[in-house]
Image (cartoon, rainbow, N blue to C red):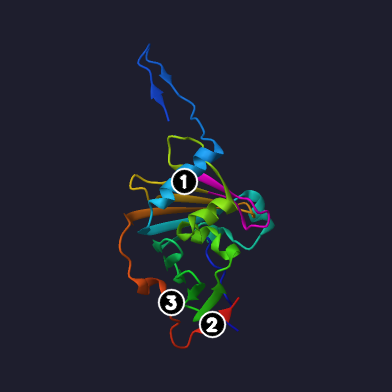
Amino acid sequence: MKMLRKTLSVAVITMSTFAPILSVTAVAAPIAASEQQATQSLVKQLTGLHSFTANFEQSTKATGKVVSQKKGLTAQHLNQTFTGTIKVERPGKFFWETTQPSKQTIVTSGKTIWIYDPDLQQVVRQSMSDQVANTPALLLSGNTNSIMQAYKVTQPDQTKTYYTLTPKAKDTAFQDLTISFGAQGAPALMILNDSLGQVTTVRFNHVAKNVSIPASVFNFVPPKGTDIIDQ
């Protein structure tokens, strides 16, 4: 019997003031934004992000406690780096493909999520429920209002465009997600802390913001002979 692999989750991030008096360097403590300010700032970032494409590099580490309890991840798995490409068109369209060290594709056009594993010739088909839509891998393509309703937003430094999102619900798979935006206004880095104590870091490079993406990218058709598993 073919075994289904677990889906890779996806899917952050410093300030000194130099005082030339007596050669002393003074470090100014960052001023955090209020929750309302942080939320408004994040909404502004997302509103200006209609689409983007990028390459990504993802790695996962765990605390010593997690490793000692053997919660499903070996040291070898934790030390692996996954690379691939991401394409997003808001709202609702998402393409995530891991190319190394193994291939896996996650695609949605807003209604159904396809998780395709070519090595196993299997694809998992899921309905785009609210719970699935609010998972870290799909946050970047989500509806802004839905994201604000599902997460508490903090901004540790009101002069920096990085934010921490904490789920308001208690039964989520992760504790918080920090996202940093680069100079272009597109995501540059994401850090996810999950409920098992694992920390997943995703770095984006070769980012292109608000580019045209063919609709066919988000329309997945299972290759002939692929087993379809409904969840």
Tag 1: residue type? Leu
Going 50% across and 38% down the picture, which residue do you hit?
Answer: 37
- Where does the magenta region start and end? 163-177
The answer for how far apart the CA atoms under marks 3 and 2 are is: 12 Å
Label at residue 42: 1
Label at residue 199: none
Residue 172 lies in the magenta-colored region: yes
Give neighbour class at mark 3: few <14, some 14-19, many 20+ (Cα, 10 Å): some
N-terminal of the two: label 3 or label 2?
Answer: 3
Residue with the mark numbered 2 = 228
The answer for how far apart the CA atoms under marks 3 and 1 are is: 30 Å
Residue 106 seen from this side: no
Going 47% across and 51% down the picture, which residue do you hit?
Answer: 190
Q: Is residue 16 left or right of residue 39?
A: left
Residue 42 seen from this side: yes
Going 67% across and 54% down the picture, which residue do you hit?
Answer: 68
N-terminal of the two: label 3 or label 1?
Answer: 1
Do the numbered discs 3 and 2 sit on residues whose CB atoms are within 8 Å? no
Query: Can you tell which of label 3 and label 1 is closer to the viewer?
Result: 1
Q: Secondary structure at mark 3?
A: loop
Tag 2: residue type? Ile
Residue with the mark numbered 3 = 220
220, above or below 132, in the image: below
